[in-house]
Image (cartoon, rainbow, N blue to C red):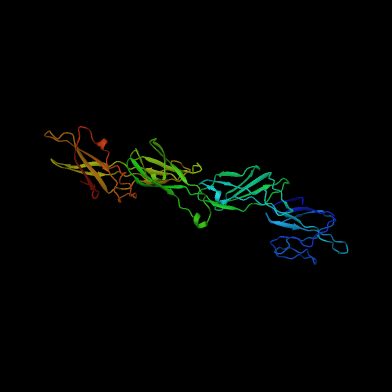
Amino acid sequence: LLYVVEEGATMEMSESRVAPPSISHSHSTSSEESPDCDPYPPAAGSSFVFDKILDPSHTSYRIPDLQADRDYAIVVRASTKTGIKGLWSEPLKFRTVAPFVIPVNELSIGENYVHFTWGRDDNPLLPTQTHKGDYSVTSQQLRIRGLDDSYSLDRTLEAVVRDLKVYGLKPATAYCIQMRCCNSSGEWGIWSCDVRFQTRATIVMRTLEIAEDYIVVRWERKKSDDRDRGYPSGRGYITRYHLRVTGDDDFAFDAELVEADSPYRVAGLRPDTRYRVVIKANYNDDEWGLWSRPLECLTLRLIEVNTLLIGEEFAKIKWSRPEQSREVVPTNKDEEPIFCFGQRRPVYQLRVTTKDTTGPLTQGHLSWAGIGVLGSGTENQDSADSVDKLDQAGSLTPETKIVMETEITDTSNEA
């Protein structure tokens, strides 16, 4: 043999006085018999895969279309001009080269990347007197194709590389990977079996409550159909999250959170101001995923209170929340944010304070604050404890005293 690769072999023929044995082995996946009237008898369980009459000028020949990592046997005999055939040569046994294998269970898959390894046994255990193929590697080629889109990546790698991380993939999208190598004779082997996988979906956020000075958000991974399609999605898991909030008032907030922090309350905001909220996940291979689709949140405007009638021992007032324009423009024109607005609240808290209760005249002071109520205007059943019912320090001074404090159901906007 001159050399053996995954899908073929090249042999050289010459005269020999060694008498061949009467039985040989020839493995094949085909059951077709040789067209020769006096064929070489194959071993039990095997059949002919190749039979060809060559011109007498041939002393070497390339046998194509063989299977990778498989045992074969070659025999040759000569024929005179009168058609008399000589004896079969001694069988030459060989095994074709094994292609690269990409282990599926070692894939590390993120939202926009995949990390994989590949390899093969360069020193396989061979039967006696079986020739080994050319396992040398001088160059390698990577091929990635998108199964859901037209994505295509072809890259040439150095011979010693055996693992690679590829970025620039789309979330929740299926791809397939293949590898092949070039040997010392300049022969490119066959492509490895394609390994299919699906990238992870991005983190999705939604608002549970938008108030005048805070926002409550919850995050979760977007549902994908990877289980239905049967593609692996990697063995990585999320270790932490990075939450970022920015506002039109130059507000900036960053926090590293864990899964148990959801839902999360972002406080210290200003009324009637737009804020941008995004989050991304960090995986156990210390890779950050993509930022989630941004939420553009507009905090509520403050409640306006007006007096309708003031008597000697009572006061009648009316309150309302000014309307907000919902015609907004994205902060980044290249993104498609989700616009979120505060919801109407059905329960309010009324507080009446006074500065002096000892004199003949009493000056009353009214201060109002909207509150969220469990099951009324909020989807978060756990957010009742996080609702800021009233900013006590901002409404009271050492000179003031609470006269009355009560909760009122919003039916007529009057009290």
Query: How many labels were placed on the picture?
Result: 0
Task: Looking at this view, name the residue that lies furthest to the bottom.
Answer: 37
Residue nearest the viewer, comparing 344 with 289: 289
Residue nearest the viewer, comparing 279 with 31: 31
Residue 285 visible in the current orientation: yes
In the picture, measured across the screen, residue 79 lies left or right of residue 250, that is right
Q: Quadrant of residue 74?
A: bottom right
Residue 65 visible in the current orientation: no
In the picture, measured across the screen, residue 246 lies left or right of residue 368, that is right
Task: Looking at this view, name the residue that lies furthest to the right.
Answer: 82
Q: Position of residue 302 (x, y in %)?
A: 29, 41
Task: Looking at this view, name the residue that lies furthest to the top.
Answer: 398
Residue nearest the viewer, comparing 41 with 388: 41
In the picture, measured across the screen, residue 270 lies left or right of residue 309, that is right
Q: Position of residue 379 (x, y in %)?
A: 34, 50
Q: Position of residue 333 (x, y in %)?
A: 46, 42
User: Could you tell me which residue is drawn at 74 percent across and 66 percent down?
Assistant: 33
User: Could you tell me which residue is drawn at 52 percent across and 57 percent down?
Assistant: 229
Q: Position of residue 48 (x, y in %)?
A: 73, 62
Residue nearest the viewer, comparing 166 with 93: 93
Q: Quadrant of residue 330?
A: top left
In the picture, measured across the screen, residue 305 lies left or right of residue 271, that is left
Task: Looking at this view, name the residue that lies furthest to the left.
Answer: 360
